[in-house]
Image (spheres, rainbow, N blue to C red):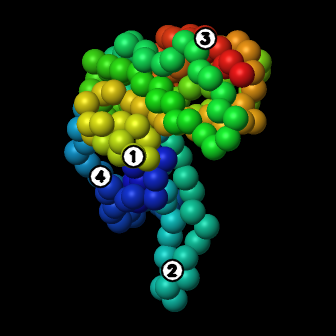
Amino acid sequence: NIYRPGTSTIIASGELMADAETSNSFYSSKISFIISRSQIGPYLVETYSIDHSNLISNSYQVTLLISRNNSIPQTSNLIAPDTIRRPTVGFELVVFTVTVNDSDGLGDVNQVFFKRIFPSSGNTITMYDDGEIAIHGDSHSGDGTYSRLVQIDQSALLGEQVFLFQAKDNVGSFSDSLKHTVVINP
């Protein structure tokens, strides 16, 4: 079986045949599959055997890296507030938006995210291009504009905060970083 990168989706399967010309037990097969240009990445190839009693052996897995002359994603057009007033009750929704382009196609964009780098925070916040304006703040699905609604409440950290925005493609290459400073006032 051959699995699409990062999923359990089988895209091709076949049966290995014994090599009649050797005295050893060598098995081989030709297998082919068609992918679009943007579907690159580490495909998982899994083999196993089944005996005459239908007992299945352990599987053997190898990675088949399908690549091309990869270009990294490009981030631009960052839209985010410069200042936010922290509410005394309830919360305020703030939208962060960034445009991502990839000359290998938007299908090559694996993840778009931002994180607070000052003061340091280990949390990565995923951005979406899904057209779910009420949930993620994104108005049009599949247009390369990624958004995220962030809820600011009375517990929000006051002062200057620096955020880093990036995109990652299917090969694992990261875009250049966009940085933005937001000041949260009382």
Determine if residue 89 is in view. Answer: yes
The secondary element bearing badge 1 is classed as helix
Precedes in sequence: disc 3 or disc 1? 1
Q: Residue furthest bottom?
A: 53
Question: Residue under circle 3?
Answer: 181
Q: Position of residue 48 (x, y in %)?
A: 51, 65
Question: Does residue 68 show up?
Answer: no
* Labels 2 and 3: the sequence-earlier one: 2
Q: Earlier in the sequence, mark 2 or mark 4?
A: 4
Q: Secondary structure at mark 4?
A: loop
- Check disc 3 and give the amino acid type: Thr
Place of residue 11 in the rendered image (x, y in percent of width and height, measured from the top left) = 32, 55
Question: Neighbour class for label 1 at 10 Å: few (<14), some, many (≥20)?
Answer: few
Q: Amino acid at mark 2?
A: Asp
- Which residue was labeled with disc 4? 31
Residue linked to disc 2: 51
